[in-house]
C-alpha cells in the first residue's frame, strides 16, 4: 500500500494565505499562531505501507494500527510490518498503536525519527541489508510493552540509537542468534532511557564479531539491577537456540564502563 503523496517528503502547506489587505495581515498571522494543534488521527492499516528508496514519510503524529491480516495483535513470528522502508528511506513523526503487527521493516539503510510504538507487536523494528556498510538510525521516539524484542537486527551493518526511551520490554536489541545467513553486526546506544521491567538491553553474537557500545544510559526502577546490559551468545545458522557465553563489559564485544550506566 503506497503512502499518499501528501505524506511524502513535502512540508505542510501554509495554514492559510494572508489577506491581501495589509490591515488584515497581522490578524491572520495571529490566528495561525493561536490556533491549537490538530489532534492526531487514527489510521487503520490493512496492508503494509511501502516507503520507497530515498523517500521520507511524515506521519504528522498520526497513529497507525493494523487491521485485517495486520490486526492479529499477537507475538507470532513471520508477521508483516505496518511500514516497509526501502534503502535510504526515512520514517518520521509516526505513532504505531495496537495492533502493531511487526512494526517497521528496513531493507537497507534507513532512518526512524521520532517514531513511537505504544504497544509493540512481534518486534518494533527489524533491520535487513545486503552489505556491511548499511547504517540504520533511530533518533528519538519510544517503545512500550514489548514482550520480546524492540529492535531485531537480521542483516549486516550498524544500528545507532540515540535519545530513545523504552519501558516494559524483553530485549531492547537482539542480533539474530540463529538466522540461516549470519553476519557481523554492530549497535551503538547513546542517550537511551529505560524503565523497568525489562530483561536485557542487548544480545549479541560474539562468535560472529558483533559489538554493542553503550553511552549515557539511564535505567529507572531497577533497584536490584536485574536488567542485563549486554548478553553475549554463540550464534548459529541452523535455527537452533543460541547458547549464552557471558555478560557484562569485556572490552571487545560489550563496550561500556560503569560510568556509562546511571541507575535511578
Image (cartoon, grey):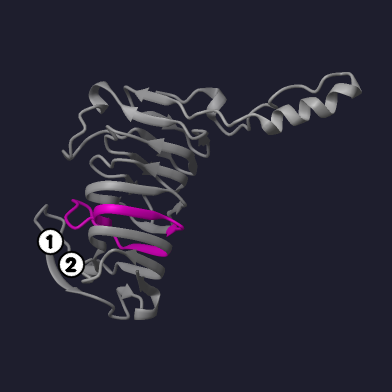
Estimate how packed mark 1 is, as few (under 14), some (14 to 19) or many (20 or more) residues with alpha carbons within 10 Å: some
State whether residue 204 is above or below residue 148: below
Please state the extent of the stretch shown in magenta in the rendering.
161-190
Q: In this view, does 253 lie to the left or right of 50?
A: left
Do labels 2 and 1 touch, CB within 8 Å? Answer: yes
Where in the figure is residue 254, as x and y percent of width and height? 30, 73
- Position above or below: 64 against 185: above
Q: Residue at x 25, y 53 (%)?
A: 169
- State the residue in front, 18 or 264: 264
Find the distance from the CA under tag 2 to the CA under tag 1.
Answer: 6 Å
Quadrant where the image shows the N terminus: top left
Kind of element beneath mark 1: loop
The dot on residue 233 is: 2
Quarter of the image for residue 170 reads bottom left
At 42% from the left edge and 55% from the top edge, which residue is drawn?
164
What is the chief secondary structure element of the magenta stretch? Answer: strand
Amino acid at each position: 500500500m503506497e503512502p499518499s503523496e501528501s505524506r511524502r517528503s513535502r512540508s505542510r502547506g501554509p495554514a492559510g494565505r494572508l489577506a491581501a489587505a495589509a490591515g488584515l495581515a497581522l490578524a491572520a498571522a495571529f490566528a495561525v499562531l493561536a490556533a491549537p494543534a490538530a489532534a492526531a488521527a487514527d489510521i487503520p492499516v490493512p496492508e503494509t505501507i511501502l516507503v520507497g528508496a530515498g523517500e521520507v514519510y511524515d506521519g504528522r503524529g498520526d497513529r497507525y494500527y493494523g487491521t485485517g491480516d495486520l490486526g492479529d495483535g499477537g507475538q507470532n513470528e513471520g508477521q508483516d510490518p505496518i511500514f516497509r522502508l526501502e534503502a535510504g528511506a526515512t520514517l518520521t513523526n509516526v505513532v504505531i498503536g495496537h495492533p502493531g503487527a511487526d512494526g517497521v521493516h528496513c531493507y537497507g539503510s534507513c532512518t526512524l525519527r521520532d517514531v513511537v510504538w505504544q504497544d509493540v507487536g512481534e518486534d518494533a523494528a527489524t533491520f535487513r541489508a545486503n552489505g556491511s556498510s548499511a547504517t540504520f538510525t533511530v533518533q528519538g521516539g519510544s517503545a512500550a510493552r514489548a514482550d520480546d524484542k524492540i529492535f531485531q537486527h537480521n542483516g549486516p551493518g550498524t544500528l545507532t540509537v540515540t535519545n530513545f526511551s523504552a519501558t516494559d520490554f524483553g530485549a531492547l536489541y537482539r542480533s539474530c542468534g540463529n538466522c540461516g545467513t549470519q553476519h557481523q553486526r554492530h549497535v551503538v546506544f547513546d542517550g537511551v532511557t529505560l524503565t523497568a521491567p525489562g530483561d536485557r538491553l542487548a544480545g549479541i553474537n560474539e562468535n560472529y564479531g558483533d559489538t554493542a557500545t553503550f553511552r549515557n544510559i539511564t535505567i529507572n526502577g531497577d533497584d536490584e539491577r536485574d536488567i542485563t546490559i549486554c548478553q553475549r551468545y554463540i550464534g548459529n545458522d541452523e535455527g537452533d537456540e543460541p547458547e549464552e557465553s557471558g555478560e557484562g563489559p569485556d572490552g571487545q564485544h560489550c563496550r561500556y564502563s560503569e560510568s556509562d550506566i546511571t541507575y535511578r
